[in-house]
Image (cartoon, helix red, strand yellow):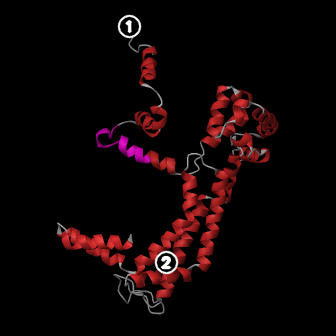
Amino acid sequence: MYASVLEVLEIVKEEGIHDQQSVEAGVLINVMESFDFVLTLHLMIDILGITNELSQALQRNDQDIINAMKLVQVSKQRLQMMRENEWVPLLEEVTRFCNIFEIEVPNMDSKFKARGRSVRKCEEITNFHHYKVDLFYTVIDMQLQELNNRFSESSTELLLCVTCLNPSNMFYAYDKGKLIRLAELYPADFSMIDLVSLEHQLSTYIIDMRTSEEFTSLTSIAALAKQMVKDKKNVVYPLVYKLIVFALTLPVATATVERAFSAMKIIKHRLRSKMGDAWLNDCLVPYIEKEVFDSVSNEVIMQHYQKMQSRMQSL
């Protein structure tokens, strides 16, 4: 698409209706025909390619936490390998690309000249140092640091413990030790007595679940919670159900939160700027959970309101 984009920008530059369009197109052409742009473009293609599978896994509705955590480790390893071994291949690829489109490739041994800065104020470094250390290393280190911050050892342990509640394949991921460890991470909600009771409760719970037909076909923690409430197992196994509730409220990825904030801008617009939190929440839930509310017929809603008692008080 690179050549096509440049061609379109050339047309806009020559035939733009307004002078501002022509000027902006000319600026974009100058930027795109620079070595800095081409190097950054290739660098980001490689980095986003490394983290693509992880990004997709975290945005799925049926999140497979075990595989997602594995992808975190793989992404870290690939980024580290790229940092150590991929500078020369990247530079060669960028150089070939620049030669095809007749873009000037700077001499890596020459002094680096920053755009828009006084020569006297610039730090004396070579192009090689700038592109490899200040750009290549810095960008990769930022990605590694972000992964380490978001998926620290403690948070990874927490997520792996949560996966033990998954009922898929007849509770294949069940691990009593990890579930007790999960409870230990919430000392305010599980006392020492609760932890002792939980150990015995889990042993009974897993046998009950694996021998009950209505639970063996479940595929998600959310479905497990619904079925437990339906069969009143939440009363029989209150401590286990508490763990399930904690697991459901744990945000694994920010995709759902980001969608909620995007919806908030649509619901609470300029004409609704004074709506309260309660009313805003009531409007957001049907908008965000469209699939759920689409399955509810108008007839059911009408009958619900018809059965409600009148709020008007007799005088």
Height in image: 193 above or below 135?
above
Q: In which quarter of the image is residue 169?
A: top right
Looking at the rendered structure, the secondary structure element under dot 2 is helix
Height in image: 52 above or below 59?
below
Structural crowding at the residue carrying mark 2, measured as other residues with C-alpha within 10 Å and reported as few (<14), some (14–19) or many (≥20): some
Judging by the rendered image, the residue that carries numbered circle 1 is: 314
Q: Residue at x 45, y 75 (%)?
A: 40
Main SS of the magenta part reads helix
User: Which amino acid does the dot numbered 2 rest on?
Assistant: Leu
Q: In which quarter of the image is residue 81?
A: bottom right
Residue 165 seen in render:
no
143 sits to left or right of 70:
left
Height in image: 31 above or below 230?
below
Distance CA(mark 1)–CA(mark 2): 75 Å
Classify the position of the C terminus by image quarter. top left
Q: Where is residue 53 in the image (x, y as percent from the top left)?
A: 57, 59
Res. 135 mark: 2
Q: Position of residue 134 (x, y in %)?
A: 50, 79
Q: Which residue is drawn at 48% across and 83% down?
A: 130
Q: Does the magenta stretch include residue 272?
A: yes
Q: Residue at x 41, y 85 (%)?
A: 99
Height in image: 205 above or below 152?
above
Looking at the rendered structure, the secondary structure element under dot 1 is loop
Q: Where is residue 195 in the image (x, y as percent from the top left)?
A: 78, 40
Discs 1, 2 touching: Cβ within 8 Å = no
Q: Does the magenta stretch include residue 120?
A: no
User: Which amino acid does the dot numbered 1 rest on?
Assistant: Ser
> Which segment is the magenta one?
261-274
Q: Which of labels 1 and 2 is toward the front? A: 2
